[in-house]
């Protein structure tokens, strides 16, 4: 994807210099931006589809546990005035990698019957707040000062009126959790 964008930018830049395209430099920049944005959106949709395909089997929490997402870190169901996240289960072998199909965490909402519902995933990256934010799905990670990490939530399995990549989901609840972690932000 990056090579295509760079190649396209180079072609537009070279052809724009002689103005043989009939597109002025401002129009060429806008044209390039439109192409990059549409290709970016197309890649985002492909990456989201791949993420859902890779995590679909984790609707059964025992399958996620067997696959390595078996450590609840930190313990408790995360909630805030902006919504909840649920329980986070980490796969330690994924920490330090950024792959759209291998999140570091899977997130579950506790249900009334004691079961857990897969609602989303969280990607994390180690670093410092002065680092350039990592990017996945065309979205920049957000610095989390509480845990000292870069984080990106993806609500792949539960609609979120706050947005697909928002930190908190008002449709997720910790109502049936046995251990609640109330936070101002994450």
Image (spheres, rainbow, N blue to C red):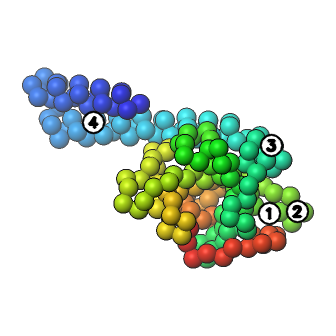
Question: Residue 66's mark?
Answer: 3
- Horizontal and vertical percent position of residue 118: 74, 52
Which is nearer the eye, 1 or 68? 68
Give the crowd class for mark 3: few <14, some 14-19, many >=20 residues within 10 Å: few
Give the crowd class for mark 4: few <14, some 14-19, many >=20 residues within 10 Å: some
Residue at (36, 37) in percent of width and height: 36
Q: CA distance from mark 4 to mark 1?
A: 47 Å
- Horizontal and vertical percent position of residue 181: 69, 73
Query: Image height check: is 24 above or below 130?
Result: above
Residue 115 located left or right of residue 119 = right
- The secondary structure type at the circle numbered 3 is helix
Q: CA distance from mark 2 to mark 4?
A: 53 Å
Q: Earlier in the sequence, mark 4 or mark 1?
A: 4
- Please identify the quadrant where the C terminus is shown: bottom right
Asked whether disc 3 touches disc 1, contact meaning CB atoms under 8 Å apart, the reply is no
* Rendered image quadrant of residue 78: bottom right
Q: Nearer the viewer, mark 3 or mark 1?
A: 3
Residue at (88, 62) in percent of width and height: 114
Residue at (33, 39) in percent of width and height: 34
Q: CA distance from mark 1 to mark 2?
A: 6 Å
Answer whether residue 141 is visible to the viewer in this image: yes
What residue does disc 2 label?
A: 114
Q: Nearer the viewer, mark 4 or mark 1?
A: 1
* Rendered image quadrant of residue 127: bottom left
Asked whether disc 1 touches disc 2, contact meaning CB atoms under 8 Å apart, the reply is yes
The outermost residue toward the right is 113
Question: Residue 10's mark?
Answer: none
- Horizontal and vertical percent position of residue 103: 62, 46
Asked whether disc 3 touches disc 4, contact meaning CB atoms under 8 Å apart, the reply is no
Question: Residue 31's mark?
Answer: 4
């Amino acid at each position: 994807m990056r090579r295509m964008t760079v190649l396209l930018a180079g072609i537009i830049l070279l052809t724009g210099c002689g103005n043989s395209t009939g597109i002025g430099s401002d129009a060429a920049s806008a044209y390039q931006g439109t192409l990059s944005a549409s290709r970016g959106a197309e890649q985002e949709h492909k990456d989201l589809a791949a993420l859902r395909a890779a995590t679909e089997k984790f609707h059964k929490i025992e399958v996620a546990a067997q696959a390595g997402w078996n450590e609840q870190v930190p313990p408790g169901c995360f909630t805030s005035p902006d919504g909840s996240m649920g329980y986070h289960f980490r796969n330690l072998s994924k920490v330090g990698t950024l792959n759209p199909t291998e999140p570091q965490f899977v997130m579950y909402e506790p249900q009334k019957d004691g079961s857990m519902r897969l609602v989303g995933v969280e990607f994390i990256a180690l670093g410092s707040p002065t680092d350039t934010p990592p990017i996945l799905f065309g979205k920049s990670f957000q610095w989390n000062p509480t845990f000292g990490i870069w984080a990106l939530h993806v609500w792949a399995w539960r609609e979120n009126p706050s947005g697909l990549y928002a930190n908190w989901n008002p449709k997720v609840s910790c109502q049936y959790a046995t251990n609640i972690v109330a936070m101002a932000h994450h």
